[in-house]
């Protein structure tokens, strides 16, 4: 029942889904399990510790470089996390690494160091390669770059404020899933709330299509009745589809096929309504 209520509020646009990274709070997804890759060796860990301590010492947080992740290093990491609004746990996860080596970027910055300009170029390169912006990398955080950042943030459930902080950097640098390129690109420009409303609108349209072009003989309802019926079914059908062995279309060239079951729902709207009436009675 709680799940149905939460889904209903999202469909109606009454509540936005929580972002994966609220503001810049750190989410630690692993503790003792390192990121593994083909060239991973014990020396990789040592190099990371040396790099971490050198960076903390540069910022005046760590006094001695020991080459070990000792108590002094942990205290320095905790101090760094406190100063940068990260979760204070002494663990150097993806967000802590991103915050250590990538500056916070936003459009209204008055002074840009050479390091910040290089970071803006890297940001612009990623946005351009993945289709969020057409701007050529120039190291200048323009309005167009800000728009590209917001599109990226909306796509990945981040706070769409156009500011590139630790959370956005972590996702930009790979802490994310692959995008389905067949999905309508309009999602880049919509807020989460607007997207749920747009998706519900598509559901209603496809249900109406099934109602008015049904091959089953019978009287066609008035538009007001059909709209009310289609709207009500959008709140119920997603749960019914989860229970049915229907394979959703994954063809990039035909993204709208994912709404095909709603046409079928419109065709059989009378039996569905009758069944629901019997169920609730």
Image (cartoon, rainbow, N blue to C red):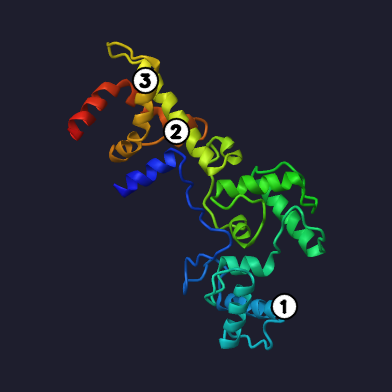
How far apart are the alpha carbons under marks 3 and 1? 65 Å
Q: Secondary structure at mark 3?
A: helix
Can the viewer see residue 210?
no
Q: Which label sits on residue 158?
A: none
Mark 1 closeness class: few <14, some 14–19, many ≥20 residues within 10 Å: few
Indicate the position of residue 237 as horizontal and vertical percent values: 33, 34
Taking the spot 52% from the left edge, 51% from the top edge, the residue there is 177
How far apart are the alpha carbons under marks 3 and 2? 15 Å
Taking the spot 63% from the left edge, 75% from the top edge, the residue there is 80
Q: Which residue occupies the foreground of this view, 18 or 59?
A: 18
Q: Secondary structure at mark 1?
A: loop
Residue that badge 2 annotates? 200
Indicate the position of residue 217 as horizontal and vertical percent values: 27, 11
Residue that badge 3 annotates? 226
Taking the spot 38% from the left edge, 29% from the top edge, the residue there is 231
Residue that badge 1 annotates? 59
- When asked about the image quadrant of residue 99, the answer is bottom right
């Amino acid at each position: 029942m709680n799940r149905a209520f939460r889904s209903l509020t999202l469909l109606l646009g009454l509540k936005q889904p929580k972002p994966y990274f609220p503001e810049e709070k750190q989410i630690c997804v692993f503790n003792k399990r390192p990121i593994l890759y083909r060239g991973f060796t014990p020396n990789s860990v040592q190099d990371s510790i040396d790099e971490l301590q050198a960076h903390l010492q540069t910022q005046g947080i760590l006094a001695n470089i020991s080459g070990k992740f000792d108590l002094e290093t942990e205290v320095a990491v905790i101090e760094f996390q406190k100063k940068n609004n990260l979760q204070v746990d002494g663990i150097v996860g993806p967000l802590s690494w991103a915050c250590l080596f990538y500056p916070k970027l936003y459009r209204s910055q008055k002074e840009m160091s050479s390091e910040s300009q290089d970071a803006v170029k890297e940001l612009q390169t990623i946005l351009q390669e993945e289709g969020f912006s057409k701007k050529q990398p120039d190291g200048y955080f323009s309005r167009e770059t800000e728009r590209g950042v917001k599109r990226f943030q909306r796509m990945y459930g981040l706070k769409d404020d156009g500011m590139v902080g630790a959370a956005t950097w972590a996702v930009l640098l790979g802490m994310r899933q692959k995008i389905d390129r067949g999905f309508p690109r309009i999602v880049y420009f919509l807020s989460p709330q607007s997207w749920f409303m747009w998706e519900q609108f598509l559901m209603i349209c496809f249900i109406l299509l099934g109602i008015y072009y049904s091959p089953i003989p019978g009287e066609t309802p008035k538009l007001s009745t059909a709209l009310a019926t289609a709207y009500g079914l959008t709140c119920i059908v997603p749960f019914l589809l989860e229970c049915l062995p229907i394979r959703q279309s994954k063809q990039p060239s035909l993204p709208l096929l994912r709404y095909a079951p709603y046409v079928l729902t419109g065709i059989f709207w009378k039996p569905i309504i009758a069944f629901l009436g019997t169920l609730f009675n």
